[in-house]
Image (cartoon, rainbow, N blue to C red):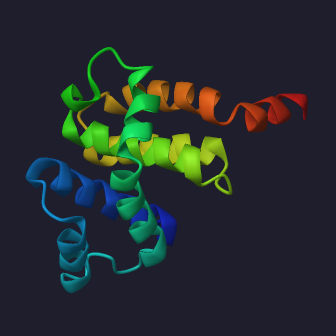
Amino acid sequence: MSSAKTKARQCAVQALYQWQMTGQNISVIERQFHEDDRLKNAQKSYFSDIFHGIPRELDKIDAAIAEFVDRGVEEIDPVERAILRIGAYELMHKVDVPYRVVINEGVELAKSFGADGSHKYVNGVLDKVAQQQRKIEIEAKKKV
């Protein structure tokens, strides 16, 4: 049984994938998710925040990811790209969510939606983004 936030992230991966592949208006995609009842059991406000926040902050998010990948962000598999963008967004903007939770959720999303082994790639990239974005939180954990 997944949490409402986990379900929101799962829907966000699918919605971001659709947005990345079609370029459709995000409000149109979000409306489809509501109409198709795909957000059932999801924390709708969290889904909406992530799904609207990523396109709004896309340049900063992609810049944070780009430092730690071996190719252009647009060249990353679209599913992995969506997962990395969600993780980077959360690391940058959802400081109430512990960085380890963000990384773990990204790994689980990659296991569910990504290609074989993509969870290792996602884990490595998000860990490096976390080291950069959540330096104070990580240092505080080391002292405990």
Question: Is 51 situated above or below 80?
Answer: below
**Residue 15, image quadrant:** bottom left
Q: Position of residue 66 (x, y in %)?
A: 38, 24
- x and y, in percent, of residue 53 in the image: 42, 58
Return the residue nearer the eye: 115 or 9: 9
- Residue 61, above or below 24: above
Residue 105 in percent (x, y) is at 49, 48
Query: Who's the residue at 90% across and 30% down the image?
Result: 143
Give me the residue at 37% from left, 63% from top.
52
Q: Quadrant of residue 133?
A: top right
Task: Check the image and report above or below for 140 versus 69.
Answer: below
Asked whether 123 or 54 is in front, the reply is 54
Question: Is residue 33 rendered to the left or right of residue 131?
Answer: left
Residue at 41% over, 79% down: 41
- Considering every residue shown, the one lying at the far right of the view is 144
Please identify the residue farthest to the left as the structure is shown.
22
Total numbered badges shown on the rendered structure: 0
Q: Position of residue 25 (x, y in %)?
A: 17, 65
Residue 38 lies left or right of residue 122; in this view the side is: left
